[in-house]
Amino acid sequence: MSLIIACATDDGVNFINRHFGDADYYYIYRLDENGSEFVKKIANTTEEEETHADPKKAGGIVQILMQENVKAGVAKVFGPNIKRIKKHFVPVLVHSDTIQEGLNELLNSYTEILNLWNQGETRRHLVLK
């Protein structure tokens, strides 16, 4: 089984150093135990937050990513809305600066990410070392 993941980025090369929901783009990848494949770039078209941890913004992000069948969101930082989005996909925190390095980390944790996805709405986030 492959997993569709969304990487939070502004430039397609590096993860942003802001909250997942503040990315300009999400680079979508297909990940399985053998490797990763770039699928597409999608723009973050959600509205700006009216208040910090705005549930409307979280809902907009979830809607965008569910249309792409995303199972995991990958970023260096998640904000308070992590509790809302983890009901819909696995939030994965990476320490890598570049998406390529992050994809390598994800490959090493593929089974754990898949297991978290299968837990449904009770899933937790994953912090990669």
Image (tube, rainbow, N blue to C red):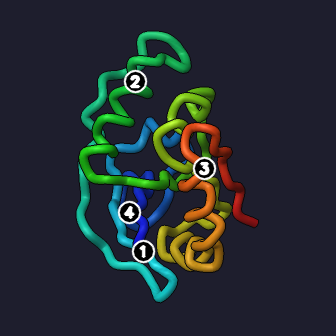
Mark 4: give few (<14), some (14-19) or many (20+) Cα within 10 Å. Answer: many
Q: Nearer the viewer, mark 1 or mark 2?
A: 1
Question: Residue flagged by tag 1: what amino acid is it?
Answer: Met
Q: Residue at x 67, y 62 (%)?
A: 95
Residue at mark 2? 57
Say if mark 2 contacts mark 4, CB within 8 Å.
no
Which label's residue is closer to the chain start, 3 or 4? 4
Q: Residue at x 55, y 50 (%)?
A: 90
Residue at mark 4? 4
The quadrant in which the N terminus is found is bottom left
SS assignment at label 4: strand
81 shown above or below 30: above
> Observer-nearest residue: 8 or 87?
87
Question: Residue flagged by tag 4: what amino acid is it?
Answer: Ile
Say if mark 1 contacts mark 4, CB within 8 Å.
no
Mark 2: give few (<14), some (14-19) or many (20+) Cα within 10 Å. Answer: many
Which label's residue is closer to the chain start, 2 or 3? 2
Residue at mark 1? 1
Q: Nearer the viewer, mark 2 or mark 4?
A: 4
Q: Which mark is residue 9?
A: none
Q: Residue at x 30, y 23 (%)?
A: 47
Question: In 3D space, how far apart are the residues under numbered discs 3 and 1 (Cα atoms)?
Answer: 16 Å
Residue at mark 3? 119
Question: Residue flagged by tag 2: what amino acid is it?
Answer: Lys
Q: Position of residue 75 (x, y in %)?
A: 54, 52
Mark 3: give few (<14), some (14-19) or many (20+) Cα within 10 Å. Answer: few
Say if mark 3 contacts mark 4, CB within 8 Å.
no
Question: In 3D space, how far apart are the residues under numbered discs 2 and 3 (Cα atoms)?
Answer: 24 Å
Q: Nearer the viewer, mark 2 or mark 3?
A: 3
Question: Residue flagged by tag 3: what amino acid is it?
Answer: Gln
